[in-house]
Amino acid sequence: MSANSPIPSPRSLRAEQAGKVLLYGIFGLLLFGPLAFGATEPWSIFLMEAGSAALFLLWIGKQVLQDGMKITWNPLFLPMGVFGLLILAQLIFGSAYRRETESKALLYLAYGLLSFLAGQTLLRGSQARRLALIFSVYGAALAGFALVYGVSANDKLYWLRAPRNGGWIYGPYVNHNHYAGLMEMLVPIPLVLALTRLASTRARAAAAAAAALMVGTIFLSGSRGGMLAMVAELVILAVLLVKQKRDLRTAVFVGVFLAIVVGFIIWVGGDAVVKRWASVNSPHSEISNDVRLNIDRDAFRMFRNKPVLGWGLGTFPVVYPQFRTFYTNSFVNEAHNDYLQLLAETGLLGFGTMLWFLLTLYSRAIKKIGNWVGDLSGATALACVLGLSGILVHSALDFNLQIPANAALFYVLCTIAAAEPFAQPARKRRLARSKPPEETLDSQEALPQPATNF
């Protein structure tokens, strides 16, 4: 600080401290969810909802300390608000089971609050760098734990607790498909970092190793949907690299990375992966593909009976038994297809809002990823888009977005992907203007972040 710099007031210092608590509180809550079995139990759902509400109150207190309301707008807030009004209309005009819709509405309110707060606090490239490191280490540590757990062949969560209804446990999740869904969103963070010029050679090598471990556990988890989603992410990344005509070094890196992943999978459990694909039509602690197709057809019949407003958010397990066309002793709690479940529960209005949301997301994110190799905003957008694309592929085969931990991370990543480029310090902006474009590629983070003042 120079001699002429103004001394910050106690209020501004407290506001800055509140901002740090907000930032790490939001992402800490996101990291907590997967460790709590995906935040699927009442106590963990309560902590997620109460935590998001507490963080929102803290954000309001921060605005008071700043003597003015400052809101950073994100175009995704509009379809999210319209979806909220749709759920309100379901509660007013009739839901098949009002209590379930109210419960699910509170959960979606928590997703919305976390997304809104992430859009207000994650504004600088330096924050994104720290979070990328945290999520990369977290993902690698969780993958390491899942790998050890998978080798131990234990049927209890954390080797201590047996799930009430059984399941195919992998990592901290009762359902291996949901572990794969989490990793699909986390893998692109270290993978994209390893391909950029935004970190040292040693850091990029460590990021590549973390990504390889995480990808390996997706295949070793036995989730076929997760495997397809991961292949889709890698194909999108490969197409982008080819389109940008990257150099020989990048091609060698990608080849070595894939060789390490394949070698790791073969070494640890290649036979299991092959047998998993060979048993496509055989159930293994989960429903068979024939049953999935029957549920899909039944869910579409549900939609045709209430095509406009749907049966009510969260009501699928309550309404579905009257549309079931096959015999089973099992309780069908989800549609195993997030798109059909959304269509049945919220009708064409909800499904159309989802399409609006995704169109806005991709149109905003694609504009930022052109120079992702040296631009932190572009790299962040690409990592988010890859992870979101993977989970959207997987959602056609499973119900990852009905798992609170995965859904909360999904919506926050959507908000980050669609946000304006990160702000950069004034000193860096002056340096960027004083250098030729080819000299500023590595130092540039993004353009300033606009905000709306009230």
Image: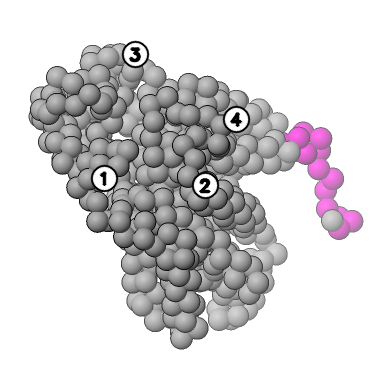
Could you tell me the amino acid type at mark 4?
A: Leu
Image quadrant in which the C terminus is located:
top right
In the picture of the structure, the residue carrying the numbered disc 1 is: 397
Answer above or below: position of 21 versus 332: below
**Callout 1–callout 3 Cβ contact below 8 Å:** no
Provide the secondary structure element on which disc 1 rests: loop
Q: Quadrant of residue 210?
A: bottom right
Could you tell me the amino acid type at mark 3?
A: Arg
Rendered location of residue 265, percent (x, y): 43, 63
Answer above or below: position of 326 versus 277: above
In the picture of the structure, the residue carrying the numbered disc 4 is: 55
Q: Which residues are magenta?
A: 2-15
**Callout 3–callout 2 Cβ contact below 8 Å:** no
Q: CA distance from mark 1 to mark 4?
A: 34 Å
Give the camera-side residue of 22 and 145: 145
Can you name the residue that lies furthest to the bottom here? 248
Residue in the image at 30% along x and 38% along y: 286
Q: Quadrant of residue 298?
A: top left
